[in-house]
Image (tube, rainbow, N blue to C red):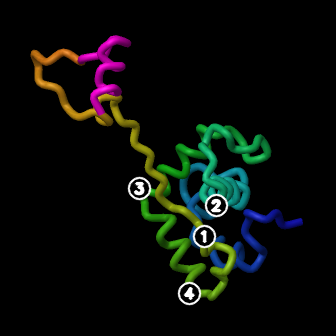
Amino acid sequence: MVRRHELSDEQWNVIKSLIPGKKSDPGRTGRNNRLFINAVLFVLKTGIPWEDLPGRYGKPNSVWKRYDRWCSRGVWERIFLAIGESGLTDELQEVQIDSTSIKAHPVASTGRRLADEKKKTLTNDAALAVLVAD
């Protein structure tokens, strides 16, 4: 049974020879390469944080570390090019490869203060005076 966010058999057959960690490769063999790729696709397609990855995919930190290693080696580019050339990209149209979130310091919303400038908070009387003046 193929789940909604996982590779089809056709897509898997196109890319399985491109994946490092096969039995024929030197070094450590990946336990289940297809499950790993499905885990990454699940995160990329749903937009969930890595730590919310369902347990059926394994430990989230292990999946992320392997994903990061593959990013630095260019494995994902080869995989997506192969799938694109095969014409089996319909299900992968909405994959979000980069998700960036930036936290802003509270001062960012009010502008930068000078070093000797104090933040001025209005007392109730001063706030009322401003409202009445308008």
Q: Earlier in the sequence, mark 4 or mark 3?
A: 3
Residue type at mark 4: give it: Glu
Upstream in the sequence, badge 4 or badge 2? 2
**Mark 3 belongs to which amino acid?**
Ser
Task: Depth check: give the residue in front, 82 or 134.
Answer: 134
Q: Quadrant of residue 34?
A: bottom right
Disc 3 designates what residue?
A: 72
* Among numbered discs 1 and 3, the one appearing first in the sequence: 3
Which comes before the other along the chain, label 1 or label 2?
Answer: 2
* Residue 56, image x, y percentages: 79, 45
Any mark on residue 85, and which?
4
Residue 131: horizontal and vertical position, in percent? 34, 27
Mark positioned earlier in the residue sequence (1 or 4): 4
Q: Which residue is disc 2 drawn over?
A: 45
Query: SS class of the residue under badge 4?
Result: helix
Cα distance, mark 1 to mark 2?
Answer: 7 Å
Secondary structure character of the magenta stretch overall: helix
- Determine whether the residue tagged by mark 2 lies in a helix, strand or loop: helix
Q: Nearer the viewer, residue 32 or 1?
A: 1
Q: Quadrant of the N terminus?
A: bottom right
Few, some or many residues within 10 Å of mark 2 (<14, 14–19, 20+): some
Q: Is residue 112 above or below residue 27?
A: above
Is the residue under label 2 in contact with that under label 1 (CB below 8 Å)?
A: yes
Is 131 covered by the magenta stretch?
Answer: yes
Q: How many marks?
A: 4
Segment tinted magenta in the rendering: 120-134
CA distance for labels 4 and 2: 20 Å
Decide whether residue 52 is among the magenta residues: no
SS at badge 3: helix
Which quarter of the rendered picture does the C terminus lie within?
top left
